[in-house]
Image (cartoon, rainbow, N blue to C red):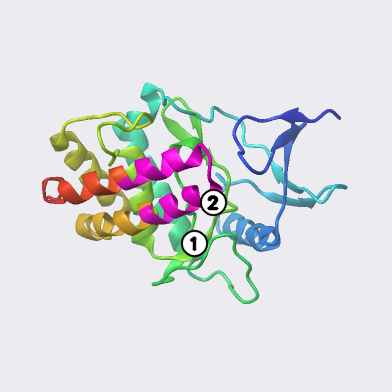
Amino acid sequence: MEDVPLAGGNTNAPVRRGEVVHRVAGPWTPTVHRLLAHLAARGLDWLPRPLGFDERGREVLTFLPGHVPSYPMGAEVWTAALLEQSARLLSAFHDATVDFDRDGAVWQQPAREPAEVICLNDFVPYNFVLDGDRITGVIDVDMASPGPRARDLAQLAYRLVPLAAPGNADLPDSPLDERRRRLAALVAAYGGPDVGTVLAWLAPLLEDAAVFADARGGRFREHARGYREDAAWVAANRAALSP
């Protein structure tokens, strides 16, 4: 059966073969597969199911049908319904990982304290599978690692409120009042932590992203500069974004 390349996947070259996806694997992949099996057993049917490895050592996962948005994001990404659903799904994911057995786990991303749950570390719109403005699936779980709930929620807020400087080419500008309202709605739909805690995580999160982008060099240095500009904007407007 022919491999059909899928859009996205900057480093893992995903291809579709019938109703399954083959992606480049890493040392962390067995842990991620064990995590996905754990989540499936707890009823999280909107994530890929692990199917092992192929003849080339690539991981094999079930294909999730639907539309995966990319920049510039369409209007369906910015609805109140999607904002609140995304927070509920992230909360459900975190809750289901509390009792995941971490013994012998290998992660692509570092663990961060407090390691309350397993964080997705990339729970953002370009990893959502959509039917209209409804999230039917979430892909690219391989960045997962232990960490604090608020950090994962802060990353979602950054991309979906959004919480970025007006010059950010990917994330639309909007009045501060609207951003404050959307941030409050996102946090409320998740069910805690509070807005102040989420905002406090943004600066270290964006600095981590900037350091990672700088290390990749070339065009990614422009991304690093953007992350730091966004962090400065959040710091300057933190009071206005708080309830």
On the image, the x and y values in percent for residue 212 come to 49, 52
Q: Residues within 10 Å of mark 1 (few under 14, many from 20)?
A: many
On the image, the x and y values in percent for residue 165 come to 26, 37
Tell me, for residue 220, which label it has, or none. none
Q: Position of 57 compared to 90: left or right?
A: right
Find out whether residue 216 is within the magenta segment: yes
Are dots 1 and 2 in contact, CB under 8 Å?
yes
On the image, the x and y values in percent for residue 220 come to 49, 41
Distance from the alpha carbon under mark 1 to that under mark 2: 8 Å
Quarter of the picture containing the N terminus is top right
**Front position in the image: 94 or 240:** 240
SS type, badge 1: helix
Write down the residue under mark 2.
Answer: 44
Q: Examine the rendering and report whether any part of residue 205 can be seen.
A: yes
**Front position in the image: 53 or 163:** 163
Dominant secondary structure of the residues highlighted in magenta in the image:
helix
Magenta range: 207-228
Find out whether residue 172 is within the magenta segment: no
Residue 141 sits above or below residue 128 on the image: below
**Amino acid at circle 1:** Ala
Q: Quadrant of residue 109?
A: bottom right
On the image, the x and y values in percent for residue 222 come to 43, 38
**Front position in the image: 154 or 84:** 154
**Front position in the image: 229 or 199:** 229
Q: Quadrant of residue 113?
A: bottom left
Tell me, for residue 96, which label it has, or none. 1
| Residue at (88% x, 47% y) in the render | 55
Q: Earlier in the sequence, mark 1 or mark 2?
A: 2
| Residue at (43% x, 32% y) in the render | 134
**Amino acid at circle 2:** Leu
